[in-house]
Image: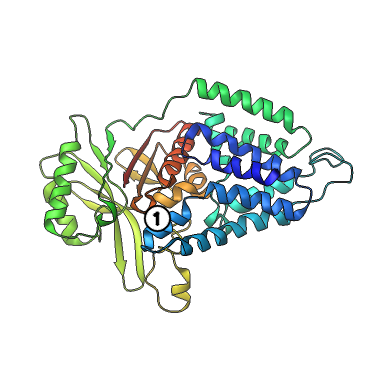
Amino acid sequence: MLIAASGACGWTAWSGHVLALPVAVLFPALWAMSPSRLTAGLVSAGYFLAASRGLPQGVANFYAADLWPGLLLWAAASLSFAGVHAALWKARPEGKSPGVGRTGMAMAPRYLSAAMLMGLPPLGITGWANPLTATGVLFPGWGWWGLVAMTAGLAMMTSRYWPAAAIVLGGVWLWSAATWTSPNLPEGWKGVDLEQGQSLGRDGSLDYHRDLIATVRRAAGEKIRFIVLPESALGFWTPIVARLWQQGLQGSELTVIAGAAVIDPSGYDNVMVAISADEARILYRERMPVPVSMWQPWGAWTGQGGGARANLFGNPVVKSDDQKLAALICYEQLLLWPVLQSMLHSPTAIVAPGNGWWTAGTSIVAIQNASVVAWAKLFGLPVVTAFNR
């Protein structure tokens, strides 16, 4: 029953609906109730596998293969999550109720340690589905104090006081849902979604770029000064592409922020570039590309290279005009530490592009959007997104 309940918890919380995220706070209680280390591991695996259920289909789409590679990656990715939670679980004294030690809080530091390990590198590289993501739904506008309150709530959920904690958090959830409003766009900004599938950025022809420039100009209204395009929209970033876009933006005050790739003999950087009629520059280098499909560190170890570089703690915020931006490209939107690192630098807005063509038939893009919205609400920040499907 605990395993089934944990799976239902992960499935519901990570369904792509932002207001469903707080269901994840039940996971610590289910983990703490486990009667054995094996059950604790299975409860953790059930939660994680259900939360990341879109991965097998996404991998199959990406590699144009059957489901087996995705299923293997799905299972492998759950091992670190389940292993950490199983290792930190502790048997409760015989006859005691879940989480009870001398103070009733014996499991709290163990759970918080597991959450921290899965939120920070290296394990945090696959640290999806962290219940802390729901903080912005329960405590919108609270910022760092909201994280403190959420951490305390998750700790209480592992103790004998979990029914009281669940009632309090449930009441807060209902109040938040009743008063919920979506984050605003930054003033003068607009995100442009595209539907170009896997062809996005792979056509380097002049016609492709001219068509995209025309799309940008059509999307720009009278008060729009910044247009955001999805990840990989410009393909390879070269001096020719930069000049073409600068010429295409002549006569306007627009600045286009778009995804591109900067390549060299050892690999490439997944970047966001800022282009106006006056300049074209690299704005942001992705801190954490998608493991396996993009980031392949074993290539450097074997001397082969060729994968995307991970700028793990680089450029947590970037500046564009008078905005200090927290940039989160695609996969980074699912993780904990890139967001929190950026928030330490007090950004004024969040920019979150992605390229989700490979997620067709899954809820991955919706989960990314829900995560970004939750973080934006927690810190009271405007957010602009742009996705390709």
Nearer to the camera, 111 or 49: 49
Left or right position of 98 against 76: right
Image coloring type: rainbow
Which quadrant is home to the N terminus? top right
In the image as oriented, which residue stretches furthest toward the bottom? 303
Residue 125 versus residue 22 in the image, above or below: below
Q: Position of residue 239 (x, y in %)?
A: 19, 61
Q: Position of residue 55 (x, y in %)?
A: 47, 54
| Residue 118 visible in the current orientation | yes
Nearer to the camera, 364 or 350: 364
Q: Position of residue 142 (x, y in %)?
A: 54, 29
| Type of amino acid at the residue the image marks with label 1 | Glu
Q: Secondary structure at mark 1?
A: loop
Q: Residue at x 74, y 44 (%)?
A: 32
| Residue 314 visible in the current orientation | no
- The quarter of the displayed image where residue 60 is located: bottom left
Left or right position of 298 against 81: left
Residue 214 versus residue 304 in the image, above or below: above
Q: Residue at x 15, y 40 (%)?
A: 217
Residue 125 versus residue 327 in the image, above or below: below
Q: Residue at x 56, y 57 (%)?
A: 121
- Which residue is identified by label 1? 286
Left or right position of 218 against 312: left
Q: Position of residue 85 (x, y in %)?
A: 68, 53
Nearer to the camera, 328 or 204: 204
- The quarter of the displayed image where residue 241 is located: bottom left
Left or right position of 15 against 258: right
Label 1 environment density (alpha carbons within 10 Å; few <14, some 14–19, many ≥20) = many
